[in-house]
Image (cartoon, helix red, strand yellow):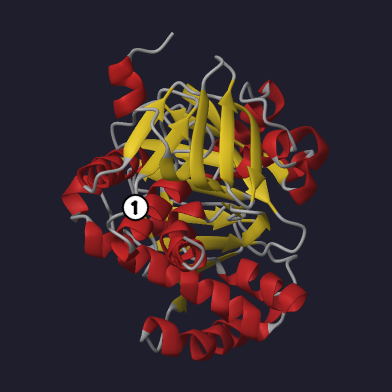
Amino acid sequence: MLSFWEKDSYYAHSDIIIIGAGLMGLWSALELKKQRPSLSITILERNTTPLGASTRNAGFACFGSLTELLSDEASMGTHRMLEILEARYKGIEKIKSYFSGATIQYDPCGGFEAIPASHETAAHLDDHIQYLNQLLSPITNLDQTFTNQTAQMRQIGLKNFDHLVGNMLEAGIHSGKLVNALSKLVIENGVTILYGLEVKEWYSNQNGVQVQTKNGLTLSGQQLISCVNGFTQELMPSLHIVPARGQIIVSNTFEHLPMKGTFHFDEGFYYWRNLDNRILIGGARNLDFEEEETTDLSGTEKIRTHLLAFLREHIVTEEKIEIAQYWSGIMGFTPTKEPLTEQIAPNTFAAIACNGMGVALTPVIAEKLAKMVTANV
């Protein structure tokens, strides 16, 4: 049974209850406090640290590779592709405005995309680069966001690819330090974060919301926001968010590693970067989409072995490449690749499904969410 002090300090009625203390939940709480400082906000997190993708991703601050953007344009149209890209770009700029590069280990190393000769863009690659540069110029304020770097491939530290496209705006970021810095800022603004509380059920009506945790606690509030992304199906199955496991491996340390930067391949299904003199690589879920549509964090030997073989084929080094560490994160995807931000029940909202771009998108989605929520407080 809770003491009077616990009930009065931690479990009292809140104006807003947020489920999930990852990037989406933290940015949402910060924006709500910015727009309405008087709000009492409690964030519930079932793990000791955010469990989904916020601290289990690959540490990229990116807004999209050339082939991914062209693919998005084909599926959702030019206008919507540019809207989402601009949100990603602004999200990264917002992160940089809140935290110093040293605080979050923001590394403006630039990004690259490797493209095979068989890809539909390869035959007229320079035309595609010029086309996207013209589209993106009003957003990035650059004449050349993308450049053809094929001639520099070996110097950059890659081999056995046909083409290479550079993007000077992409960067690496320390995901754990970003979440840690954001958590501290949220707490400084008066938000309560309760760790180790897994939500079992929630209820809402016109008068407010109740959240029941698996250890028997019940919390009440005026409004509820779900920010659990890839785990949404467990609490809100009607939203049809598809979980997507992102498996990651980290290599041994090299005495000399010429490869520096962030890299993509196969429309973003493969992504790798250097961690000082180690290599982090993740992805390859397109080897078996069905098996990777899971919230199981265990990962598979099949994907890990494939990622290791990919490194051995494409990284320039005379040194042996081995797996030193591995983990998995869980992303959330919508069928259309559109982020989901909406009211789903009385006094209940959801901000989820950044479709693998949570680092860049969450700061901007949180602004939209906060306006929706405060309009109803």
- Residue 332's spot in the image, x, y percent? 64, 46
Residue under the point 71% across and 82% down? 77
Asked whether 47 or 167 is in front, the reply is: 47
In the rendered view, would you say 363 is above or below 207? Answer: below
Establish if 241 lies above or below 49.
Answer: below
In the picture, the quarter occupied by the N terminus is top left
Question: Can residue 200 be seen from the camera position used here?
Answer: yes
Q: Position of residue 100 (x, y in %)?
A: 18, 55
Q: Nearer the viewer, residue 375 or 48?
A: 375
From the viewer's side, name the closer residue of 200 and 104: 200
- List the single residue furthest toward the top: 1
Secondary element at image label 1:
loop
> Residue 34 sits in which quadrant?
bottom left
Q: Report x, y in % for residue 113.
A: 53, 62
Picture residue at 43% right of the left edge, 90% below the top: 138
Q: For this rendering, which residue is in front, 270 or 165?
A: 270
The answer to whether 377 appears left or right of 297 in the picture is left
Q: Which residue is mark 1?
A: 39
